[in-house]
């Protein structure tokens, strides 16, 4: 039987005994052509580091992390554990021919199925046998969701299986490129974009009719074959709307933030087909403009934009975009799900009307509607915009009426200002809450990996920590500490600390006399006692660089019993990000501080106010102290002992760490 192997570059048949997956001609071309342009992230287009094994940059992987209400083991949201074997995995019926793509949680190989002598795409969990039960279940949901859909524009699943602890599924191998790369390298025309998205929308509608939501639609999850035919891939976040087990809880945020519907970003537990209509709109937006609807430098800033801002009109980015196509796109991206297309099929029909030169059903947003949206986002400014013309009008009616109206208008303006400032405080608290949850997932994953791994080495632990420090500049250090003789039967104490004290970061064993009692520190003792993750601090870390640090630590459990702790440290520099948020909102006279669970100062712009000082130690401010103790959202107006100005103190809790955010806004009236 002739060989079925072909060159992965030019598709020329290869000899049966060929030592590589590239023919000799392509090897020669590769060795003589100039260096290729740098590979780019399939989601944001940023250049990937040389030697990167993933198709997604570290920033996008971080943004795609799941933000959870329970900081338990959530492998999809934290760094991938190092491989425990060299080379690709081995499966009895599959010969691995090469790697096709690698993401934050899975890897896809080109493989030959021996029993049927056919080339397939083989997907496996990236963490292999270290995968948690939840990761395995999510992987199977993806495979089973796609396998239940028999549609010409959804990649068909051939086999779902498990071998040697490695879960996998095989599917049709589509020769082509992902849409995100196509958009960046060879943008489609408007007609091509509309035709492609209409086809994809029909495929998604087919899934909706069978009770399956995709929930992660984006250009990198659309594969375009060589003949231009699009395929929907990656049902990793698929959900059955007709029942069945759900892998997320209220408060979970699942998806890719730049393309995520606001109701997904809010962590709601009930979704409709509108979330996928929004995702389709995000794809159309990028087809028309070359960029996603929303972009941000951090998860917090991106969340704020998705929840509060309207996307820029495509014509403001590319003036040549047709007005009706812009209208279709922006209807998909409405904040209110009820204002989007009722079904993906209706979206496809409107796109087909546009292609046929017929009137579309979607109507552009009016100036009045845009004004209402603006007023909801900026209540204080909107109130003032109403107050000024109202005051001018009353001048012609009479002094008494003017006085009554202006007093009422001032009250309304002050109330609107107060509402805005409380909303701002909730926003800052929400940003910190989301980011702290994201950070807390990392030690949870490491703890989970150590729980299921019988043996580990100091080199492995150091490697994991260095990878995390490289990927997340917010993290100052990581700690691996164990109960006596649990890390190494030949030694009692073991505490490894990998931090930024040195440049580049490095690890050290904290076994000097002052660290033999590390088990008495709260960051170690509390998670051991409670068997749950705990935020602790601030405290001075003499093992670091005499910095004030806060830490989140998670117990390592074996058979339900704690054998050690994984901790992640943030320095006080972390809280300076709040200053940037206030500057973004043009509140440069305001400042913010954070209080810990015992009302101690966790982060404050004035170094005079730092742990172990608490809010109780500051003279005066009885109203603020009472509000902080209540752990409720609210505000008080008092004299600020720091600035000596009459100020409004707005307070909001951060439940993830049992902390409190206080924003201080000086008042000149």
Image (spheres, helix red, strand yellow):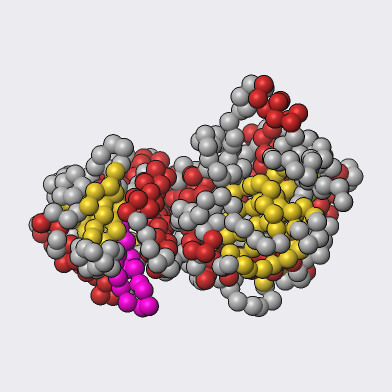
Find the residue positioned furthest to the front.
Answer: 17
Q: Is residue 567 magenta?
A: yes
Residue 270, percent across and down?
A: 59, 71
Which of the 4 image quadrants contains residue 142? bottom right
Question: Residue at the location (22% across, 68% down)?
Answer: 484
Instruction: Name the one closer to the observer, 581 or 474.
Output: 474
Asked if residue 50 lies left or right of residue 613, the reply is: right
Q: Main secondary structure of the magenta part?
A: strand
Which of the 4 image quadrants contains residue 168? bottom right
Residue 389, percent across and down?
A: 49, 44
Q: Please say if 6 is above or below 303.
A: above
Q: Is residue 422 visible?
A: no
Which of the 4 image quadrants contains residue 23? top right
Residue interval drawn in magenta: 553-571
Asked if residue 120 lies left or right of residue 165, the reply is: right
Question: Residue at the location (83% across, 54% down)?
Answer: 349
Question: Residue at the location (52% across, 71% down)?
Answer: 133
Residue 419, percent across and down?
A: 39, 57
Q: Please say if 436 is above or below 498.
A: below
Instruction: Name the one closer to the observer, 519 or 322.
Output: 519
Q: Is residue 491 magenta?
A: no
Question: Residue at the location (32% across, 54% down)?
Answer: 458
């Amino acid at each position: 039987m002739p060989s079925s192997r072909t060159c992965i570059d030019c598709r020329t048949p290869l000899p049966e005994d060929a030592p590589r997956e590239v023919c000799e001609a392509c090897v020669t071309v590769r060795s003589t052509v100039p260096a290729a342009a740098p590979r780019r992230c399939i989601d944001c287009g940023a250049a990937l580091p040389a030697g990167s094994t993933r198709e997604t940059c570290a920033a996008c992987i971080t943004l795609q992390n799941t933000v959870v209400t329970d900081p338990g083991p959530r492998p999809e949201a934290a760094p991938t554990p190092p491989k425990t074997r060299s080379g690709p995995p081995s499966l009895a019926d599959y010969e691995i021919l090469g790697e096709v793509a690698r993401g934050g949680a899975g890897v896809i190989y080109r493989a030959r199925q021996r029993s049927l002598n056919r080339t397939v795409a083989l997907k496996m969990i990236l963490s292999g046998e270290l995968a948690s039960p939840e990761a395995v279940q999510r992987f199977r949901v993806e495979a089973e969701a796609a396998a239940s859909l028999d549609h010409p524009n959804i990649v068909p699943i051939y086999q779902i299986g498990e071998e040697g602890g490695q879960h996998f599924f095989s599917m049709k191998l589509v020769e082509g490129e992902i849409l995100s790369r196509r958009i960046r390298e060879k943008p489609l025309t408007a007609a091509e974009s509309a035709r492609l998205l209409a086809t994809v929308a029909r495929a998604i509608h087919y899934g909706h009719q069978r009770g399956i939501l995709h929930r992660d639609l984006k250009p990198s999850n659309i594969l375009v074959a060589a003949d231009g035919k699009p395929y929907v891939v990656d049902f990793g976040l698929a959900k059955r709307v007709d029942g069945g087990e759900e892998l997320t809880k209220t408060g979970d945020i699942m998806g890719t933030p730049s393309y995520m519907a606001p109701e997904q970003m809010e962590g709601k537990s009930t979704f409709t087909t509108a979330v996928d209509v929004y995702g389709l709109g995000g794809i159309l937006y990028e087809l028309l403009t070359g960029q996603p609807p929303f972009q941000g430098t951090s998860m917090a800033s991106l969340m704020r934009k998705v929840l509060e801002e309207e996307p820029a009109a495509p014509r403001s980015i590319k003036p040549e975009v047709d007005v009706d196509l812009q209208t279709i796109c922006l209807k998909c991206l409405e904040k209110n799900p009820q204002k989007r297309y009722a079904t993906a099929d209706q979206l496809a029909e409107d796109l087909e009307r546009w292609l046929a030169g017929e009137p579309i059903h979607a109507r552009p947003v009016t100036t009045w509607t845009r004004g209402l949206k603006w007023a909801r986002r900026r209540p204080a400014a909107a109130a003032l915009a109403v107050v000024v013309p109202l005051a001018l009008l009353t001048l012609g009616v009479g002094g008494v009426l003017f006085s009554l109206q202006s007093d009422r208008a001032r009250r309304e303006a002050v109330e609107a200002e107060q509402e805005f400032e409380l909303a701002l405080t909730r926003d800052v608290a929400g940003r910190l809450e989301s980011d702290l949850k994201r950070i807390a997932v990392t030690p949870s994953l490491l703890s989970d990996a150590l729980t299921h791994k019988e043996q580990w080495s100091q080199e492995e632990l150091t490697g994991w920590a260095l990878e995390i420090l490289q990927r997340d500049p917010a993290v100052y250090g990581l700690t691996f500490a164990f109960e006596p003789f649990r890390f190494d039967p030949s030694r009692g104490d073991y505490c490894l600390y990998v931090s930024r004290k040195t440049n580049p970061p490095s690890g050290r064993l904290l076994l000097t006399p002052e660290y033999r009692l590390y088990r008495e520190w709260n960051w170690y003792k509390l998670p051991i006692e409670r068997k749950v993750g705990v935020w602790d601090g601030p405290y001075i870390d003499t093992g670091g660089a005499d910095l004030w640090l806060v830490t989140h630590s998670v117990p390592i459990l074996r058979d339900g019993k704690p054998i050690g702790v994984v901790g992640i440290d943030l320095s006080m520099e972390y809280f300076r990000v709040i200053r940037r948020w206030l500057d973004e909102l043009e509140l440069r006279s305001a400042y913010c501080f954070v209080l810990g669970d015992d009302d101690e100062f966790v982060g404050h712009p004035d170094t005079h106010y730092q742990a172990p000082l608490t809010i109780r130690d500051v003279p005066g401010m009885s109203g603020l102290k009472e509000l902080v103790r209540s752990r409720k959202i609210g505000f008080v107006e008092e004299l600020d002992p720091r600035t000596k100005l009459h100020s409004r103190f707005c307070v909001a809790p951060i439940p993830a760490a049992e902390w409190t955010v206080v924003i201080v806004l000086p008042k000149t009236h």
